[in-house]
Amino acid sequence: MVLTKGDEYPIHQTAEPVAYSGTDRNFYDRFFFNGYAPGADEDGFFAAAMGIYPHINIIDASFCWLKDGKQINLHASRGLGMERMDTFVGGIKVEVLEPLKSVKLSVDAPDHGIRAELTYVGRAFPLEEPRFTRRNGPRILMDVTRLTQNGTWQGWIEVDGVRTEVANWLGTRDRSWGVRPIGAPDAQPASPPMMAQFYWLWSPTAMEDGDFYYHTNDDEHGRPWNRRAAWRPLGGGIEDEHHYDTADSTIHWKQGSRHAQNASVTLTDSTGETKVEFDIGPNFMMLGLGYGHPKWGHGRHQGDGETIEREDFVPAELDVMQPHHLHVQAVSTVTMTGPDGKVRHGKGVLEQLVIGPHAPSGFKGMLDPA
């Protein structure tokens, strides 16, 4: 048994100390953030993430900055020491100021030329997404709960001595926890062998008077196994949450890639049909936050001490069909037209990760491009 700071709080889920999270080796607890300049044509995007992996005893985090077509990523990892309340690593720190409403994100890595002080406040109460449970044959691939919340950012970011003031920037945070692949991959092959398949779209969008959320996980036939579209007005609570009856997305893929050129979502409810259209801008490469990264994948052991590393690249110069370059968030301006003709304008991201076959997109193999 190991007592840690969390044991002082009434948050236990089992008879074990908080340091133990059930029995699954792949349990994780994760923070994610993004933020972007609010104007339709304004440049500037940041993202951050922090993962806690109790049963492999590692914490890691990343902070990323995308501007003028260049993406800069700061990666950090250390041993967790079984202390889940110490949410800092490599100069990246997350502090909960007011649960379910406000969070502070700090970065202090002067040796790598990156510093930031950013405070986030939610625009409304967080949205709890449907539980994500997916098996590959008998194996659990995902069993995850996630909350998502749009908000505003205040503060500053400094990269290589150039400071950018962040005033009323828009953005999204999520908190997820549960089971998904982390750390070193399982050496045991699937039996029988099966082709990997994962189709994911996510579009948290800040509109003028509220927030639009859409996501879908589809199987190879295009059938959703987890999908929802919702609207929440500014300052709204759970009782103000509106769920659409149906939601269908249309993606036109860039030739030679699995990245969207343009996209739309058609929503229906008792009032009629609503159309949401995405004018897609630059791609942020999610490997900057460890997603699919060949070295900095989530929960990978980076050494016995604290390890910090910076990487720089130009997203437009990358080979977009490399598996670790498939996962992106595209900064987008968004137009939402209701059944009464009312038009709302906003900004958000369209996250995309498409691996394996997907019949509506014309993808038949593991990595065939459009």
Image: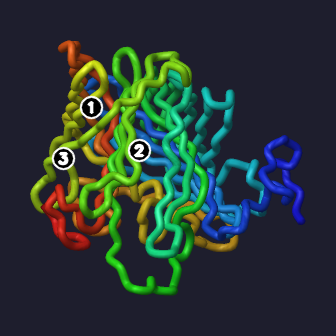
Identify residue for label 1.
Answer: 267
Which numbered dot is residue 65?
2
Q: Residue at the spot x=86%, y=57% of the render?
A: 15
Instruction: Indicate the position of residue 218 as horizontal and vertical percent values.
Output: 32, 55
Q: Residue at the spot x=29%, y=33% of the render?
A: 43
Give the residue type that dot 3 points to: Ile
Give the residue type that dot 2 points to: Trp
Q: Is residue 225 visible?
A: yes
* Of the pair 256 and 176, the residue shown nearer to us: 176
Q: Residues within 10 Å of mark 3 (few under 14, many from 20)?
A: some
Q: In the figure, 1 relative to 173: above or below?
A: below
Q: Residue at the spot x=44%, y=47% of the render?
A: 64
Say left or right for 60 vs 17.
Answer: left
Q: Residues within 10 Å of mark 1 (few under 14, many from 20)?
A: many
Q: Is residue 36 visible?
A: no
Q: CA distance from mark 2 to mark 3?
A: 27 Å
Identify residue for label 3.
Answer: 251
Instruction: Give the structural element (helix, strand or loop) at label 1.
Output: strand
